Image: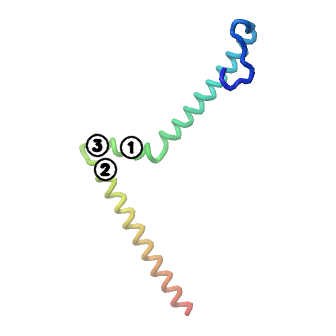
Amino acid sequence: MLGDSDITDAISESVGDKIVRLIREVARLKRLISEAIATLSALKSGDLARLMLQFDEAQSRGLDGLADLILTIEWQIHEAKSEWSRLRAEETELWKAID
């Protein structure tokens, strides 16, 4: 088994040693599978997966999902700029009131 410091000869290995080695290998593989399942679950529930689903749904309805995404992002940028301008004007008024 890789990573073990003591490499044993398969021929001279006792049945008990083989069972212990196989039990450890099964446990290691179960851990790896659990980690892979957790990673896959995290990826499936992430923002990129949701975006891909939205894109696929738009395409299935005959829409250009990318164009819709671009419009949504442009609208969000516009809203953020508007909010920033409003807050900046509010800050300017507060500074004027202090002086």
Q: CA distance from mark 2 to mark 1?
A: 10 Å
Q: Amino acid at mark 3?
A: Gln
Q: Position of residue 27 (x, y in %)?
A: 66, 23
Q: Position of residue 85 (x, y in %)?
A: 42, 76
Q: Amino acid at mark 2?
A: Leu
Where, quadrant-wise, is the C terminus in this rendering? bottom right
**Camera-side residue: 62 or 26?**
26
Q: Residue at x 57, y 35 (%)?
A: 38
Q: CA distance from mark 2 to mark 3?
A: 9 Å
**Camera-side residue: 81 or 23?**
23
Q: Return the mark for residue 52.
A: 1
Instruction: Say which label, 1 or 3, has the lower sequence index.
Output: 1
Q: Secondary structure at mark 1?
A: helix
Q: Residues within 10 Å of mark 2 (few under 14, many from 20)?
A: few
Q: Secondary structure at mark 3?
A: helix
Judge whether 97 appears above or below 63 on screen.
below
Tally of numbered tags: 3
- The answer to whether 5 appears left or right of 66 in the picture is right
